[in-house]
Image: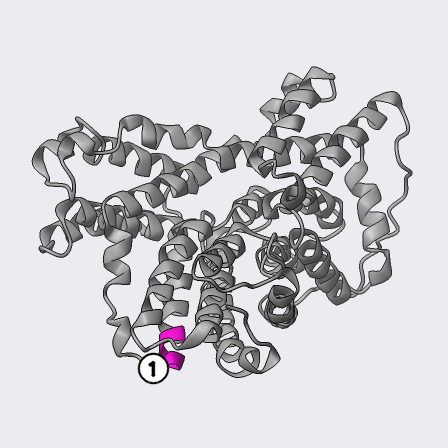
Amino acid sequence: MKRTYWVFLGLVLLGLPSLFHSESLNPAAAITMGLFLMAGLFWVTAPIPIYATSLLVILLQLVLLSKNAPGVQYFSFPYPAELAPSPAVFTGTLAHPILILFLGGFMIATVAVKFSLEKNLVRILLAPCGSSPRLLLFGILLATALLSAFMSNTATTAMMVAMLLPVLSRLTADDPLRIALALAIPLGANLGGMATPIGTPPNAVAIGALASSGIRLDFGQWMLMAVPLTLTSLLLGGLCLLALYPPKAKKIDLQIPGRFDRTGSAVLMYLVTGFTILLWATESLHGVPSTVTAFIPVALLPALGLITKEDIRSISWEVLWLVAGGISLGISLEKTGLATWIVGLIDWQTLPFFLLVAGFLGVSVLLANFLSHTVTTTLLVPLALSLGTSGVISGPGEMALIAVSIAVASSFGMSLPISTPPNAIAISTGAVNSPQMFQLGVVMAILGSLLTWFFATWLWPHLLSFNQ
């Protein structure tokens, strides 16, 4: 009965915006808003499998929003109907580069488990935590954040999830610590990405936009601003997890026996995995995109016989479908003008700086739950910097502060499985569900926005000056 109620409410939300569209909200954008609301509800309440929601979104986009589809024949677009997105734009999200990045991470995680690499990494990396469940939680948070500060958040999450599995196997099925540990990995990956300019693409977007405005923000300046925020957020996030999911276990035996496999196949696996991770970690030096690097394990691991067809069948393909739906929805938000309409709801130029920062933070966190964090930052940072000539934002300092604020705030948009790749991977473990992720995501969105606002308006202005 409850499932039927959520499905009915989702269908109502799907059609409701189209009944009240206006000149400022064109029909195509109204349809997209309906998809936005329905998908958000379904992803939070899960009346149907969350990956099925993603596929349903793509189907409805094909029917209502793609070129030559029935919807385009009856609803006007903000551009000529012949310029409506091709069906391939939506179906192509099922082969999007970010999905290849996922697949590469899944391949590495699969082969790591096959050769017990993750057990040995757990044994080494978590040994300092002793047997304390609370120290273990913070150890996983910090280890994940440290890795994600210098390499792909998705690849970091895939590796950490592989390392987490033997730890979860040592906990009883009803121990809330299982949920806390499973959520700690995407939390650490999302927050760790804020710490360095190369940690996540939104950071580079903000730095590039500032450079285009003649404002230079170097690696050290970014870290001086972002590392304290990251560490504070990790501390609060860990305390939230312990409050929401207090561990039953008094101690965890992390004396995991074993040694590194030294067979020829294992050595090949170490070489392929190590080379891939090295390229991910040094992307800023060589310029090879992480999505291209991800194809190394996708191609070489099966070619070398390290992964079999049975291993390939065991990969969580439904997670890839889940992410594809989120990417596809983001395309509609941009193409139909809905994202711009949402941003335009606030008259930014009437706000003083501290309220201006608060407004951009709120919109950034909200949009980042549905759009990719990169798209969110790409949309908002130019808008914020365009206010530099309005008198609301004065000087390079305030422009840099608001651009950095928007970029790091997007990393707090992690309430839904489709909000970030790390979230989707965490869901694939089966140790956490959508409502649990939503609960933590909302708490972190509020705390993160408040923290970022405090840092941007009170601390960062006194830490450093900006060059123009």
**Mark 1, residue position:** 352
Depth check: give the residue in front, 93 or 317.
Answer: 93
Residue under the point 40% across and 48% down:
46
Residue range corresponding to the magenta coloring: 352-357
Depth check: give the residue in front, 345 or 102.
Answer: 345
Where residue 445 appears, as percent x and y from the top left, is 47, 66
Where residue 194 appears, as percent x and y from the top left, is 58, 60
Q: In this view, does 249 lie above or below 60?
A: below
Where residue 129 appears, as percent x and y from the top left, is 82, 62
For the residue marked with disc 1, what is the amino acid? Pro
Where residue 30 appears, as percent x and y from the top left, is 18, 49
Element on which disc 1 rests? loop
Residue under the point 77% across and 65% down:
135
Depth check: give the residue in front, 59 or 373.
Answer: 373
Position of residue 222 in the picture relative to residue 116 (left or right)? left
Residue under the point 78% across and 66% down:
250
Q: In this view, does 137 lie above or below 266?
A: below
Q: Can residue 5 be seen in this view?
A: no
- Which quarter of the figure has residue 86? top left
Residue under the point 64% across and 72% down:
228
Position of residue 80 in the picture relative to residue 96 (left or right)? left
Q: Can residue 416 be seen in this view?
A: yes
Position of residue 381 in the picture relative to residue 274 (left or right)? left
Look at the image and say whether residue 328 sits in the magenta stretch. Answer: no
Q: Residues within 10 Å of mark 1 (few under 14, many from 20)?
A: few
Q: Is residue 342 above or below residue 54?
A: below
Look at the image and say whether residue 353 sits in the magenta stretch. Answer: yes
